Amino acid sequence: MFILCSERGGKDLAGRYLIAGSIIYHQLLQSGFIVRGGLGFGPIVRHRDLFLGRGFLDAYRMSEARSEAVRHVCAMLVSPSLYSFVSWSEHWCRLLCFYEDHCFLHPTTLTDPDLGEFDKDRILRCLMDGGANESKVEATRRFLEGFEDYDDDLLEGSRLRALTGWQPANERTEPPLRVEVDDPMAFDDWTSLWHEVARLRGRTYAPPPRDERG
């Protein structure tokens, strides 16, 4: 397990976590690790080698208490808490993707000059070289072939566009919907967040049909 934390705040802190998480994900893959982690957001207390706090628990849930649909996907699952703090802009949204209605750190969009480009084939090769079992390799293959990202969000009728309520700037008549809650930790799983988003938009959330789940 690794823990990424910062003692400094500042502008676009959540976005900077996405960048750092993406680089670490690629570094671990290249080093032979089987990466199935989570990115959370919130305060933590550190005392020597002991970490406590809601931020730590948030990330732990994304890594260790995943739903069955994404349990074996070797990628970084982003918590609803972190997602709610990411600035709604193309720059940051391109670092995210969605699969089975869960938000993940985009596995290929960022390229570090020292590590080189990570495409879908390279990620799978790293996992197999690292000794990942068949269920993890196949789950990750389905993820890499099936996630929706920012470019998919542009498509009329895409599931991601229906979930998030996103619209191109030239079509938008009001600001993008943001989920504002007193306690972002109220959403500890993606299903509860989508139910709240649907409620605010006067709709009902319907999970992915079985033929989308593979």
Image (spheres, rainbow, N blue to C red):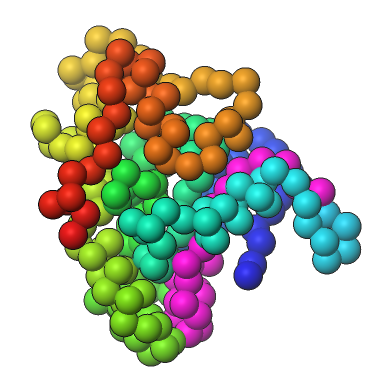
How many numbered tags mark residues here?
0
Image position of 163 with respect to 172: above or below? below
Image position of 112 with respect to 192: above or below? below
Which residue is more in the foreground, 148 or 60? Answer: 60
Residue 176 in sight here: no
Give coordinates of residue 1: x percent, y percent. 63, 70
Residue 56 in sight here: yes
Name the residue furthest top: 173
Which residue is more in the foreground, 152 or 12? Answer: 152
Q: Quadrant of the C terminus?
A: bottom left
Give coordinates of residue 152: x percent, y percent. 19, 43
Which residue is more in the foreground, 146 or 192? Answer: 192
**Is 6 within the magenta?**
no
Residue at screen point 18% across, 50% down: 210
Residue at screen point 53% across, 34% down: 187
Name the residue furthest right: 47
Residue at screen point 53% across, 66% down: 24
Q: Which residues are magenta?
A: 24-45
Left/right placement of residue 208 relative to residue 177 reads left
- Dividing the picture into quadrants, the one containing residue 42 is top right
Left/right placement of residue 184 relative to residue 125 reads right
Left/right placement of residue 60 relative to residue 156 reads right
Give coordinates of residue 43: x percent, y percent. 73, 41
Which residue is more in the foreground, 172 or 148? Answer: 148
Give coordinates of residue 92: x percent, y percent. 41, 41
Residue at screen point 29% across, 51% down: 99
